[in-house]
Image: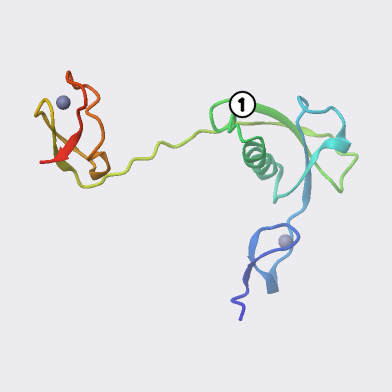
Amino acid sequence: MSSGHERCPICSDWAWMERHRCAPIWLVLDPEQSGEWEDAVKVYATDPEQAAEKWAQDEDVESGEYSIVGGTDMAVQVRRLDEPDAAPVWWVVTGESIPTYRASEAWRVQCNRCREYEDLTPERIGQQHEACRYEGSRWEAA
Ligand SMILES: [Zn+2]
Ligand SMILES: [Zn+2]
């Protein structure tokens, strides 16, 4: 049974399919890859801004380099597929990676060699005490 909220097979947006209409198609051209509009990437988006953003996300994922999210701005040209005579508009896409933090309950551990204590995550138990002045050190549950 279908809930009706599905991924559109055409534009790949998640949508209530009964009422869904695909967003218009935009062409996004990266001049560093090609100067030809035939090589532009087709993106379904509600506006050119979203088209440039979606392109940036796909570009980062496809290249596997995540350079945009890593701070390298890119300038691209965007225009609607169904408006071939309209002048393309330049958009600069920028990204940032959001630092994530995670808290887990600390374990009191003790180095088996220098007897120093520290509060660490339990995964560290059995691992080396890196700053230890002795050989063969490892953290043990205290
Ligand atoms: Zn669609
Ligand atoms: Zn130690």
| Quarter holding residue 124 | top left
Quadrant in which the N terminus is drawn: bottom right
- Measured along the vertical axis of the image, is residue 12 above or below residue 74? below
Q: Quadrant of residue 29?
A: top right
Q: Residue at x 66, y 27 (%)?
A: 74
- Percent from the top left, x then y, of residue 84? 89, 41
- In the rendered image, the residue lying farthest to the bottom is 1
- Residue projecting furthest to the right: 85
Closer to the camera in the image, 108 or 134:
134
Horizontal side, residue 61 vs residue 89: left or right: left
| Residue 102 shown left or right of residue 70 in the figure | left
Q: Residue furthest top?
A: 133
Q: Quadrant of ligand 1?
A: bottom right
Label 1: how many residues lie within 10 Å, few (<14), some (14-19) or many (20+)? some
Q: Is residue 134 above or below residue 5?
A: above
Residue 5 point in image, percent of width and height = 61, 70
Q: Please give the name of the residue rendered at 77% of the width and 53% of the height, measured from the top-left corner.
A: 24
Q: Nearer the viewer, residue 19 or 56?
A: 56
Which residue occupies 53% across, 29% down?
70
Whole-percent x and y of residue 66? 58, 33
- Mark 1 = which residue? 73
Taking the image as shown, residue 4 lies to the left or right of residue 137, namely right
